Image: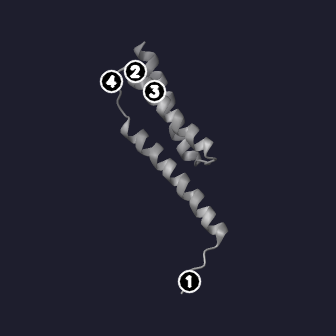
Amino acid sequence: STIDIDCKLRHDAEVLHKKLGQEQKITQFLEAKHHHDNYKDIRNDVEKINNYIKEAEDQNIELDEEIVEKVNRFTRRLISERNLRK
């Protein structure tokens, strides 16, 4: 017996798979980065999370609004924390 795969459904599944993979990577990073020992760690993590977002944009991945808001809150918190340490 042969398996017939709808090309459009396959494409949609591949797009969703890429999106979920990118969102998982971002979410795991955010969950792992609650504490920062120094100014340099803060700067590096802001750069890393911005790179994850850029990577998604470069691949035309439309991230869920909830993920984008989490990233924005994380970045605002880190920038505030960094400013307090100056």
- Residue that badge 3 annotates: 78
Task: Tell me the amino acid under the disc marked 4.
Answer: Asp
Relative image position of residue 25 (x, y in whole percent) = 45, 46
- Residue that badge 4 annotates: 37
Mark nearest the camera among 3 and 2 is: 2
Assess whether mark 1 and mark 2 are in contact (beta carbons under 8 angstroms): no
Relative image position of residue 47 (x, y in whole percent) = 49, 29
Q: Which mark is residue 62?
A: none
Q: CA distance from mark 2 to mark 1?
A: 56 Å
How would you rate the neighbour count of disc 2 (Cα within 10 Å): few for under 14, some for 14-19, many for 20 or more?
few
| Element on which disc 4 rests | loop
Sequence-earlier tag: 2 or 1: 1
Relative image position of residue 43 (x, y in whole percent) = 45, 23
- Residue that badge 1 annotates: 2
Above or below: residue 72 compared with residue 85: below
Residue at x-position 57% and y-position 58%: 16
| Element on which disc 3 rests | helix
| Element on which disc 1 rests | loop
Task: Tell me the amino acid under the disc marked 2.
Answer: Lys
Task: Tell me the amino acid under the disc marked 3.
Answer: Leu
Residue at x-position 47% and y-position 43%: 26
Task: Tell me the amino acid under the disc marked 1.
Answer: Thr
How would you rate the neighbour count of disc 4 (Cα within 10 Å): few for under 14, some for 14-19, many for 20 or more?
few
Relative image position of residue 50 (x, y in whole percent) = 53, 33
Please, which residue is most extreme toward the front here? Answer: 2
Nearer to us in this view, 28 or 58 = 58
Mark nearest the camera among 2 and 4 is: 2
| Element on which disc 2 rests | helix
Please, which residue is most extreme toward the right here? Answer: 8
- Residue that badge 2 annotates: 40
